[in-house]
Amino acid sequence: MSLNTEMVLDQQLLPIIEKVKNGQRLSLEDGLTLYASTDLLTIGQMANYVNMKRNGNHVYFIENLYINPTNICEARCKWCGFRRDPEEDGAYAMDEEELLAYVEKRFNPRIREFHIVGGHNHTVPFEYYVNTVRTLKKHYPQVTIKAYTAAEIVFFAKISGLTEEEVLKELMKAGLDSLPGGGAEILTEEYRKKMSPDKATTDEWLHVHRLAHELGMKTHATMLYGSIESLQDRLTHMIRLRELQDETNGYLCFIPLAVQPKKATASLKMRTSAFDDMKTLAISRLMLDNFPHVKAYWINIGTQLTQMAITFGSSDIHGTLVEERISHAAGALTQSGITRDELIYLIKGANKQPIERDTFYNIVEEY
């Protein structure tokens, strides 16, 4: 595959195209040039070029089940519609029986991953979180457990008196296989002090992932964009992840998440634009040259933009989910789950090859 420069509308992109052709790393300044450009198709073409060199025509998905064991949370993040105070209507914390009943009702034999995140529930001990993993691994030993964000790990250390490393080791003994990428939001302190002051700092979040990688675990990383952050903040976030990946090579995938309004009835102007979504996905692929995959998260941008995204540098469209709660509590307008056949249809519709995977991108089936 070659990069066609004949149709480039923005001449400012020509030096970046040369860097991309030659496999050179892009700088923060390059990223700002990309964000400033309105030549979306050229940016998308560059991202597709990079992705095709790395992943070919493959687009990955997984059969997975989201589980949110509790929505009680001591943190008060500005965008969150999921959290509850302990005595608030709708507050819950699943016990072991409720957890197993929830999963049994939604489980099918093709599910290969439990994706587990929840509130920072300070009314239960650390053992509650360990037992959640242990219980699921006992009853579903064939299913990979991807559980607890780095922010949750920092919270567990606080309530248990253990170090973050000790927390990770206890969870791994119980059956933890991988960390999801949540809790990253934007990895600058100016942003975190305004939007998520009660959660892990930038350094703490990165430290947990560094520890996980050193313990042999592969993890994921997100970016929540579209609120108060600057474009430089987004790029700083990507570069900090890129630097850690240079150090550990422990990340599997980067997932840009478009922020959702707090209510589904909120004005559409509060949402990110399709232009911003496509540009951010493409720039992510170009900046994060050492990440195997960039994921288009259909829950946040919808299935049609997700289909477009796989020609803008994305090599993964996530999974079936079955019942997603957190983005929908914040105002996501998409469905809460999707079938394997629908995911395959989306991928084939963009002339790409659907690849069903496990958590670690091992191929389960090619379609």
Image: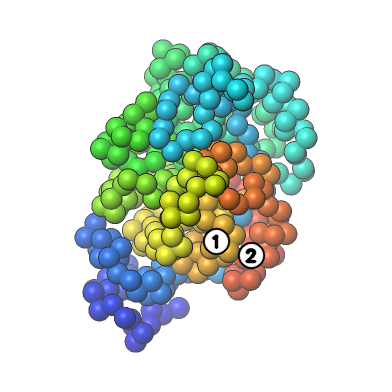
Q: Is residue 159 above or below residue 345?
A: above
Relative image position of residue 49 (x, y in whole percent): 42, 71
Q: Quadrant of the C terminus?
A: bottom right
* In this view, 348 is above or below 91: below
x, y percent for residue 314: 49, 61
Is 186 on the left-hand or right-hand side of 58? left
Q: Residues within 10 Å of mark 2 (few under 14, many from 20)?
A: many
From this viewpoint, is residue 59 visible?
A: no
Q: Residue at x 41, y 12 (%)?
A: 161
Q: Kindly check if marks 1 and 2 are in contact, taking CB atoms under 8 A apart as contact.
A: yes
Q: CA distance from mark 1 to mark 2?
A: 8 Å
Residue with the most extreme bottom position = 6
Residue at 27 percent across and 73 percent down: it is: 13
In this view of the protein, can residue 72 be seen by the observer?
Answer: yes
Residue type indicated by callout 2 = Leu
User: Mark 1 packing: few (<14 Cα in 10 Å), some, or many (20+)?
Assistant: many
Residue shown at the point (56%, 20%) measured from the top left: 88
Q: Residue 303's spot in the image, x, y percent?
A: 59, 60
Numbered circles on residues, count: 2
What residue lies at 69% left-to-right and 60% top-to-bottom? 342
Under mark 1, the amino acid is Thr
- The numbered dot on residue 94 is none
Name the residue carrying label 2.
346
Q: Earlier in the sequence, mark 1 or mark 2?
A: 1
Picture disc at residue 306: 1
Quadrant position of residue 116: top right
Colour scheme in use? rainbow
Task: Say above or below: 256 vs 79.
Answer: below
Q: In terms of secondary structure, where does tag 2 sit?
A: helix
> In the shown orientation, is residue 185 left or right of residue 325?
left
Dot 1: element: helix
If the image is split into quadrants, where does the N terminus sit? bottom left
